[in-house]
Amino acid sequence: MMHIDCNLKHNHDCGHTHNHSYADISGQRLFWVILLNITISITEIIGGFLSGSLSLISDALHNFSDAVAVVISYIAILLGKKNNSIKYTFGLKRAEVLAAFLNSSVLMGIIFYLFYQAIKKLIHPESISGNMMLIVAIVGIVGNLLSIFLLKSDSTENMNIRSAYLHMLSDAISSIAVFAGAVSIIFFKIYWIDPFLTILIGLYVLKESFDILKSSVHILMEGTPLEISPEEIKESVEKKFPVNNVHHIHIWAVGEKDLFTEMHIDLSDRMLSEADALRVDIENHLKEKGINHVTIQFEIDCCNDKGLICKNNQ
């Protein structure tokens, strides 16, 4: 998008500094999470075939997809830390959002496949070795709880790590459910509990994955961050500063924590000499609201359309 100022220079200070807040993710912790998930996956695949348990095999696929997801997450984090370049002027921070989108999409696909297999098992129940199922479930519980512990601190600050964390959390819950199912099979011979638990676990994971998918799509489509109101931004700037009008506001996120805005601001002739100082004050005001990249186009009554949003996409 190109803006042409009329009667006044475009005030965009490329020398200003921005504060980037990214979680300092430990590569060593992610390595152990990957190793734990691969170990759990191999154990559950072997145990699932030996016991005849669908929930173990499905959980093994789930855990293996989680290991792949964490690898993708780590690569995305490394890309996100690269400096801006001529080719990528915003840097590669959106790689983390893209990874969260891919992770949640793949997980949702796996869940629908597990639903299909679980329904088949409900219609035609099969004998399952509860003892083998119990042992493997314990291995899964321990491994997934360790993974959760390793990712917990970073999951609150980073969408990408939060998606990987939710993978681990869902795995831990499913392992606990498998454990309970194994106990039911050993003592009560309730074989239908295995596919039934698979469906219950899948519904939970589906809901959590959809929330991440929705948030990542919103960012990728450059939607206005949900915590920011363009109307409130316009009102606060017009109320606090000596400007005639604020219009054509765009607010978007490059990464989860990297918010950008650009806007047109009408000034009177008498404000021309104070424009640069005014720009700095407005930037600081908006940064207090969580927007860390601000571009302001000052002008003197040159836009025919002075609505909050530019309707002609120019």
Image (spheres, rainbow, N blue to C red):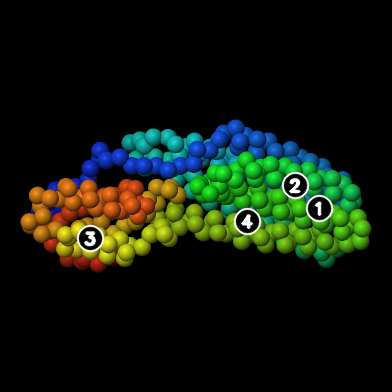
> Circle 2 is placed at which residue position?
141
Q: Which amino acid does label 3 sit on?
A: Lys
Query: Mark 4 against mark 3, which lies toward the viewer?
Result: 3
Q: What residue type is labelled 4?
A: Met
Mark 4 → mark 2, Cα distance in angstroms: 22 Å
Query: Mark 1 against mark 4, which lies toward the viewer?
Result: 1
10 Å neighbourhood of mark 4: few (<14), some, or many (≥20)?
Answer: many
- Earlier in the chain: of badge 3 and badge 1, it is 1
- Earlier in the chain: of badge 1 and badge 2, it is 2
Q: Are marks 2 and 3 in contact (CB under 8 Å)?
A: no
Any mark on residue 240, and which?
3
Residue 126 seen in this snapshot: no
Q: What residue type is labelled 2?
A: Ile
Mark 3 → mark 1, Cα distance in angstroms: 60 Å
Pick whichever, 13 or 214, lies toward us. Answer: 13
Mark 2 → mark 3, Cα distance in angstroms: 55 Å
Any mark on residue 179, and which?
1
Q: Is mark 3 on a helix, strand or loop?
A: helix
Q: Residue at x 73, y 61 (%)?
A: 199
10 Å neighbourhood of mark 1: few (<14), some, or many (≥20)?
Answer: many
Question: Residue 140: horizontal and vertical position, in percent?
Answer: 76, 45
Mark 1 → mark 2, Cα distance in angstroms: 9 Å
Pick whichever, 93 or 138, lies toward us. Answer: 138
Pick whichever, 236 or 57, lies toward us. Answer: 236
> Circle 4 is placed at which residue position?
108
Question: Residue 217: horizontal and vertical position, in percent?
Answer: 48, 56
Which image quadrant for residue 91? top left
- Earlier in the chain: of badge 1 and badge 4, it is 4
